[in-house]
Amino acid sequence: MTKNGITYCKCGAPARPRQRNCRSCKNASTKRSVLKRKLAVQRLEQALHHLTIENPATRREYESQFRTRAVAICDEDGMPAIAGFVVGFLADRMLQVMDDDGKNHFVRLDRVVEDFGRTVDGEILHVE
Ligand SMILES: [Zn+2]
């Protein structure tokens, strides 16, 4: 809203120069979007947790060696080849790993290495 050449924020305070809202409304809205992003990451972690197929023995062994769900699947020479996230713990030390294209790979625990550098939205997905 503009009155006498001055633009007002919807709260009634004068807006910032060349903007439509005031400083405190802008701060509040930034805070809201940061919280929203945090919530989105939390939901993703929860979804991942609920979607996980559980084999307690494989999961225990995985958690004793890995701190995150971000892994790389190694090729026959032991070189990290495919990056993905562990989405399932199967019987007999098998893992279900979803790669960046959403493709599932079923690999033995000793074929994957932890991928420390990978994050989702700047935050590492921790194993609970
Ligand atoms: Zn305002």
Image: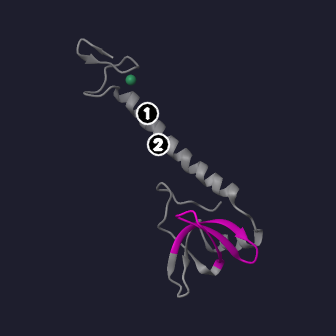
Q: Which residues are magenta?
A: 82-109
Residue shown at the point (52%, 64%) measured from the top left: 100
Q: Which residue is mark 2?
A: 34
Q: Earlier in the sequence, mark 2 or mark 1?
A: 1
Q: Badge 1, how many Cα within 10 Å: few under 14, some, many 20+?
A: few
Residue type indicated by callout 2:
Val
State the SS at label 2: helix
Residue type indicated by callout 1:
Ser
Say above or below: 103 vs 36: below
Left or right of 49? Residue 70 is: left
Q: Is mark 1 within 8 Å of ligand 1?
A: no
State the SS at label 1: helix
Say above or below: 30 vs 126: above
Q: Which residue is mark 1?
A: 29
Tell which residue pokes out farthest to the top in this image.
4
Say above or below: 43 vs 16: below
Q: Position of residue 119 (x, y in %)?
A: 49, 61
Residue shown at the point (64%, 52%) measured from the top left: 46
Circle 2/circle 1 CB separation < 8 Å:
no
Q: Is residue 110 inside the magenta stretch?
A: no
Residue shown at the point (50%, 83%) measured from the top left: 79
Residues at marks 2 and 1, CA–CA distance in whole angstroms: 9 Å
Q: Which image quadrant for residue 18?
A: top left
Q: Position of residue 12 (x, y in %)?
A: 37, 16
